[in-house]
Image: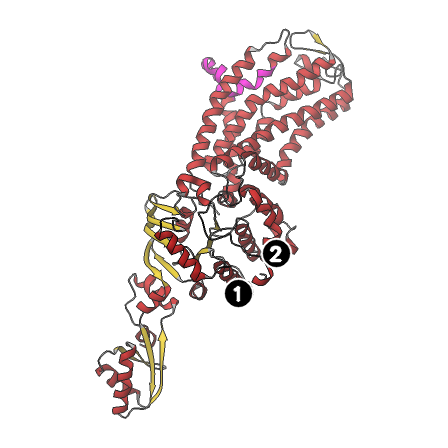
Amino acid sequence: MSSAAATPPLAPPVTGTPGVAHGRRPSTLMAYRWELRKLVSQKRTYMGLGLAVILPLIFVIVQNVHQHHGGGGDSIFAAQITQSGLATPVLMLLFESVFFLPLIASLVAGDIVAAEDGNGTLKTILTRSVNRGQVFAAKTLAALTYGAIAVFLSALVATVGGVASWGFDPIKTFSGSIVSAPEGLLLVFAANACYMIPLLTVACIGVLLSTATRNSTASVVGAVGFVILLFIVSGIPGLEGIKPYLLTEQFENWHGLLRTPTDWAPIWHSAWVCALYAIPSLFAAYLVFLRRDVAGG
Amino acid sequence: MLDRSEIGQRATEDTARGEEAPPVRARGLVKRYKEVLAVDHIDLNVRAGDVYGFLGPNGAGKTTTLRMTLGLIMPTEGTVELFGRDPIRLGARALEGVAGFVEAPRFYPYLSARKNLELLAALDGGGARERIAEVLQIVELAPRAKHKVGGYSHGMRQRLGIAAALLRRPRLLILDEPATGLDPAGMRDMRELIRRLADEGITVLLSSHQLPEVQELCDRVAIVDRGRVVYEGALADLRRQGGAGYRLRSTDDTRALAVLRAQPGIEHAASGEHGLGFQAQESDVGALSLALARAEIGILALTPELATLEDLFFRLTENGAQPETPIGAGATA
């Protein structure tokens, strides 16, 4: 290491009461930005996003190769796949909303705290000038951002692929009424935005598992396993009464947007049902994170 | 730049006026993991300007204590304060002016050293970012700053850990085994850097297994064993407690041993491979030399042997007692 004479003093003045080392305290926004930069720098991040991009691409390619002319599907959108390119993103959302998008969101949410615990970097960032609450908020926001980006990317690729293959044409909704292409495009992205409510709730559960278990694999598997468990529960005869309150049932909340007139009821219902899952999960995760012993690394 | 005595004096005056709390004050720290008592009522008193050695065998509770000191783990009982602020209660606010690392410093392997420091500087706020180039220069990592930390050797990560700590311009530096994994030149450089930091007024809490390093750098030490502090105080006092030993080579060791055993003030006289060892106050050694002369025994060599920190460390941690056994007798018996 370089000699003492060559470098300026390393220490601050020794007098006075030590206070904030550098004046301005770091903001949560700054911590959030760095969480995103960390995500951008990791290969694993692109695995999930790659899945979100590849699935609609494969779908579009397969449909092009088979020259599907509609009428063979079991939904109104499958029937009009070659009639309007906007049917593709709706079909993709129907397909991906059940398992793939929750899996992609869980990949990062389940990893976001546990990976740092395992690598020992949690102690590195918790001995700086940000408090634990800020770090937790930044990590949670980053996990939610990732889930939202995955949904958006998937919708974007499906829309571009669909429109490029079959045109930007009016589309028939669940109610059978036809909406113009621009309105259909708006509805497609609004539907994806609505779907983010239950999806980001899955991410919140992933963050809780990541904080509590300190194990990335267990957290990802746990979050996805929870979704599968709810699907099983929803199929058990005699439990129909609880079905409207299962998180998995909220994955279809966006269907209301594609009806004429717009049915807002499932969207509002999903908002408060998801809040019942998300808020306690985040609150519990926050408490665990604040009080946990950081002994790894 | 102030020298150590000025800093120490100023700190003492500040404390006396109640203007500034000590860098580290721990009282009755306990950490229990189910059945295991990792830390058992530890008190620490690190004063401003100290280079404070924190010693103990593996599993003695050093790292757990340091983690509690930095607010990373919650004490089961007891309190710790950094400049009078409780890191458990106040979180990051208590760590202002404090930096360091516990166990091996950890970084994001997929980011370069510079990016890692940029991240940490962002989490420090203010002007820390402007010091990145300077601290990289100090630890001689500037040429490798753009390389990913995943490809760094252990020693390079240790140096990056020091750089990350210096970003905060600390007044208290907590270093856990900073020389581990360094080659001899790296260890020497690390010692020089720590000495330089201390000279500039930074209080250093240094946990180390390198006893010669602690002996060279530290003025005060705490030795822990099985979760308890078995000694805390000035290193010089500890060495004095260890007793002054002497080694004697004479023209007739057999008769000389008899004289030693009969002489008042001479204790623990014993014969060894390299002569005779004994324990005595300096004033009694003069009388001994006269007694040997009266017995017509020639003195070939009579040399004082101070207890080394290593001797004292093993005596404290292996016997679980305060230093009592004389060093001369121990060395030669």
Direction from residue A123 to residue A148 in the image, left or right: right
- A189 shown above or below B216: above
Q: Which amino acid, mark 1? A: Arg
When asked about the image quadrant of residue B205, the answer is bottom left
x then y, percent, for residue A81: 72, 16
- The answer to whether any part of residue A265 appears in the image is yes
Which residue lies under the disc numbered 1? Answer: B188
Direction from residue A155 to residue A26 in the image, left or right: left
Position of the N terminus of chain A, as image quadrant, is: bottom right
The answer to if B226 sits in the magenta stretch is: no
- A76 shown above or below A124: above
Q: The disc numbered 1 marks a residue on which chain?
A: B
Q: Are marks 1 and 2 in contact (CB under 8 Å)?
A: no
Question: Which mark, by number, is residue B137?
Answer: 2
Front-lying residue, A68 or A154: A154
Question: Which mark, by number, is residue A217?
Answer: none
The answer to if A249 sits in the magenta stretch is: yes
Secondary structure of residue under mark 2: helix
Marks 1 and 2: which is nearer the front? Answer: 2
x then y, percent, for residue B235: 37, 64
- The answer as to whether the residues below labels 1 and 2 share one chain is yes
- The answer to whether any part of residue B112 appears in the image is no
Q: The disc numbered 2 marks a residue on which chain?
A: B
x then y, percent, for residue B143: 66, 56
What is the magenta range? A231-254
Direction from residue B253 to residue B185 in the image, left or right: right
x then y, percent, for residue B98: 47, 49
Q: Residues within 10 Å of mark 2 (few under 14, many from 20)?
A: some
> Which badge, 1 or 2, comes first in the chain's sequence?
2
Q: Which SS type dominates the magenta stretch? A: helix
Q: CA distance from mark 1 to mark 2?
A: 17 Å
Q: Which amino acid, mark 2? A: Gln
